[in-house]
């Protein structure tokens, strides 16, 4: 792959690229990264030291100058000779004072001397091109950067270390070994070759299918870990949804009044509960109304509830179960709903509801909030949190490839039991290998590469 299309433009890997690798804004330091065959030559033109004479992986103090020889900043320069670098190419990092203006001026000087501004993810793409990491590990780089909780970071680190890649390659080897035997049957039928019995082949493929099923099933947990969840507060006006939102996030985010219909639009807040990241949405109270703006808010409430990963249906214990509440109970998805009887500080006994997940709270007095958080986790994880040391699938792309490979393995097993011609069995096994290879990038289209790396941040 000598040429790769970033954003519909073709760029040669012979280019030397540069970008600011640290986040925008002011800080202690900023880092400008340069990678490519002319990295040393280009930096040398703006740097006071003798960069070309430095040993690889050494750190040096020097100065960066304007074309007018005016000082831009005193910097630390790190030289990493390829292939012992992140990209596998000659890499230079310039560490300057953490002013966005200084960093941009240094970057501009590098461009003036022949570097090209890097596209999003281009450093990681070059690492992939140069065999420093496979595609799955490259994706894990961005996952680690964007991780919003400890579980997401742990999953990304395990993928970055190659644990999932190793699992995929092991399964590929098992499939390849079986495919070789079956293809020998096809190529030399008259020889009566039998490197393994049919039962042994079935047993091997069943083990592969079981491992693929386990990976596919991990996607439920992996998606929750990596993408976060949407949590929707639903209920009639004045049941305490806004108060409950404030109690969960620990601050006065939503306006709380006794006037029905105060919340007319969706109000969202990013929160963490334990090890998970949530988008918590307070919705307009559900009721019969003729007010146009409130009607639109109620429509949005229903839409938010439908799309949410989890619904907190808030009921007022002092009112009991109203006709509006009963209608909501009929409409919502009970498997993803927690019934929250609010205002229990009023010493009222809530009526019976036949539902699996019911919690009693007083948002105003902060009663039952910890129990609600505990129930949220139990419902999300179906009663059991994932093993932190286990391999999980976090990407939709990986999940679909694994499901495709699993389907082909199961088809091959069925054909073996039906004594189907081995040519068809061998074809399905080769296609399963193709599906798995797309995960680690040994057989992947440029469109897939483009869709992956365009989501990376610049400088990574």
Image (cartoon, rainbow, N blue to C red):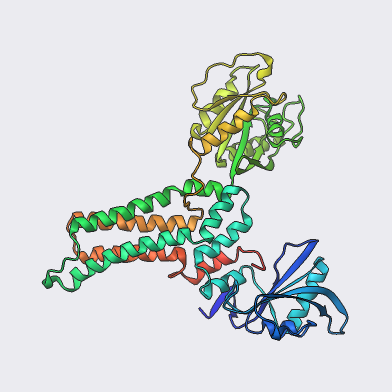
Q: Nearer the viewer, residue 40 or 104?
A: 40
Q: Nearer the viewer, residue 70 or 227?
A: 70
Q: Is residue 379 visible?
A: yes
Identified at 32% across, 58% down, the residue is 408
The image position of residue 172, as x and y in percent, is 36, 63
Identified at 59% across, 46% down, the residue is 228
- Residue 274 lies left or right of residue 434; in this view the side is right
- Residue 173 lies left or right of residue 185; in this view the side is right
Identified at 55% across, 47% down, the residue is 225
Q: Nearer the viewer, residue 366 or 424?
A: 366
Q: Is residue 7 visible?
A: no
Which image quadrant for residue 358? Answer: top right
Identified at 63% across, 56% down, the residue is 146
**Quadrant of the frame with the C terminus:** bottom right
- Residue 214 lies left or right of residue 4; in this view the side is left
Query: Quick check: 154 above or below 170?
Result: above
Query: Quick check: 104 above or below 383?
Result: below
The image position of residue 101, as x and y in percent, is 82, 69
Total numbered circles:
0
Q: Nearer the viewer, residue 354 or 160?
A: 160
The image position of residue 80, as x and y in percent, is 64, 76
Query: Quick check: 117 above or below 362?
Result: below
Query: Quick check: 289 above or below 196?
Result: above
The image position of residue 151, as x and y in percent, is 57, 48
């Amino acid at each position: 792959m000598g040429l790769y299309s970033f954003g519909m433009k073709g760029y040669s890997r012979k280019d030397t690229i540069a970008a600011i690798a640290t986040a925008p804004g002011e800080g202690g330091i900023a880092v400008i990264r340069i990678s490519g065959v002319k990295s040393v030559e280009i930096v040398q033109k703006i740097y006071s030291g003798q960069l070309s004479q430095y040993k690889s992986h050494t750190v040096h103090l020097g100065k960066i100058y304007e074309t007018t020889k005016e000082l831009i900043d005193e910097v630390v320069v790190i030289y990493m000779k390829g292939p012992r670098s992140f990209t596998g190419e000659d890499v230079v990092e310039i560490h300057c004072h953490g002013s966005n203006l200084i960093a941009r001026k240094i970057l501009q000087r590098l461009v003036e001397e022949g570097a090209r501004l890097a596209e999003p993810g281009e450093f990681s793409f070059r690492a992939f091109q140069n065999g420093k990491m496979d595609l799955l590990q490259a994706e894990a780089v961005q996952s680690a950067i964007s991780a919003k909780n400890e579980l997401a970071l742990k999953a990304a680190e395990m993928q970055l270390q190659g644990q999932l890649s190793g699992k995929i390659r092991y399964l590929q080897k098992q499939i390849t070994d079986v495919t070789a035997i079956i293809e020998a049957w096809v190529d030399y039928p008259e020889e009566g070759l039998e490197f393994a019995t049919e039962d042994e082949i079935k047993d091997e493929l069943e083990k592969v299918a079981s491992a693929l099923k386990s990976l596919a099933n991990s996607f439920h947990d992996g998606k929750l870990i990596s993408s976060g969840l949407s949590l929707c507060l639903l209920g009639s006006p004045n049941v305490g949804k806004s108060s409950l939102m404030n109690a969960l996030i620990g601050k006065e985010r939503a306006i709380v009044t006794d006037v029905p219909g105060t919340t007319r639009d969706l109000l969202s807040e990013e929160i963490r509960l334990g090890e998970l990241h949530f988008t918590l949405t307070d919705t307009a109270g559900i009721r019969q109304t003729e007010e146009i703006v409130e009607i639109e808010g109620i429509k949005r409430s229903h839409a938010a509830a439908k799309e949410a990963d989890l619904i907190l249906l808030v009921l007022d214990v002092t009112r009991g179960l109203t006709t509006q509440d009963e209608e909501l109970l009929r409409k919502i998805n009970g498997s993803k709903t927690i019934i929250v009887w609010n205002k229990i500080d009023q010493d009222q006994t809530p009526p019976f509801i036949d539902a699996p997940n019911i919690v009693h709270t007083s948002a105003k007095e902060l009663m039952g909030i910890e129990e609600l958080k505990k129930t949220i986790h139990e419902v999300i994880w179906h009663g059991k949190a994932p093993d932190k040391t286990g391999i999980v699938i976090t990407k939709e792309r990986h999940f679909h490839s694994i499901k495709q490979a699993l389907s082909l393995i199961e088809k091959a097993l069925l054909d073996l039991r039906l004594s189907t011609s081995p040519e068809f069995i061998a074809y399905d096994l080769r296609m399963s290998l193709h599906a798995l290879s797309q995960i680690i990038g040994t057989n992947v289209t440029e469109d897939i590469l483009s869709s992956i790396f365009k989501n990376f941040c610049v400088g990574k």
